[in-house]
Image (cartoon, helix red, strand yellow):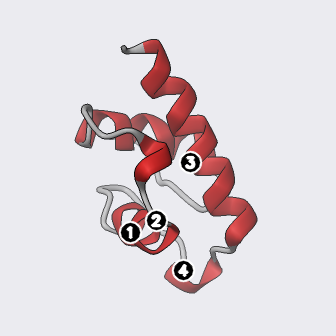
Amino acid sequence: MPGELTWDDAEGIALALREKFPDVDPLTIRFTDLHKWVTELEGFTDDPKGSNEGKLEAIQMAWHEEWKESQ
């Protein structure tokens, strides 16, 4: 994936997660697992401690929108 991903790149992270986990319903993922998956994405360069509930929720909702479109 080109470029660097940070916690503020909800759309970019959502696209990367959809590609990596195409069959996963994002609303079934716990925030602890989502945090781990985001920090393990290729191109993610932000501080793992820089997330919060709001950022994780924004990522989850963006991923959910992408996931719905692919169903």
Q: Name which residue type carries label 4.
A: Asp
**Residue at image coords 36%, 14%:** 71
Q: Residue furthest bottom?
A: 49
Q: Are marks 1 and 2 in contact (CB under 8 Å)?
A: yes
Going from the N terminus, do you reach mark 2 or mark 3 first? Answer: 2
Q: Distance between the Cα atoms at labels 1 and 4?
A: 16 Å
Q: Earlier in the sequence, mark 2 or mark 4?
A: 2
In this view, which residue lies farthest toward the front? 28
Q: Is residue 62 left or right of residue 16?
A: right
The answer to which image quadrant residue 15 occupies is: top left
> Please, what is the three-letter code of the amino acid marked with disc 3?
Gln
| Element assignment for label 4 | loop
Q: Position of residue 32 (x, y in %)?
A: 45, 75
The residue depicted at 38 percent of the width and 15 percent of the height is 70
Q: Which is in the foreground here, disc 1 or disc 4?
A: 1
Asked whether 15 or 61 is in front, the reply is 61
The residues tagged by marks 1 and 2 sit, at their Cα atoms, a distance apart of 5 Å
Quadrant (top left, top right, bottom left, bottom right) of the N terminus: top left
> What residue did someone put label 2 on?
30
User: Pointer 3 and pointer 4: residues touching (CB < 8 Å)?
Assistant: no
CA–CA distance in space, label 2 to label 4: 20 Å
Residue 60's label in the rendered image is 3
Residue ID at (38%, 69%): 33
- Label 1: which residue? 33
Helix, strand or loop for disc 1: helix
Q: Mark 4 sits on what residue?
A: 47
Mark 2 vs mark 3: give the one in front: 2
The image shows residue 28 at horizontal and vertical percentages of 42, 50
Local packing at callout 2 (Cα closer than 10 Å; few below 14, some 14-19, many 20+) is few
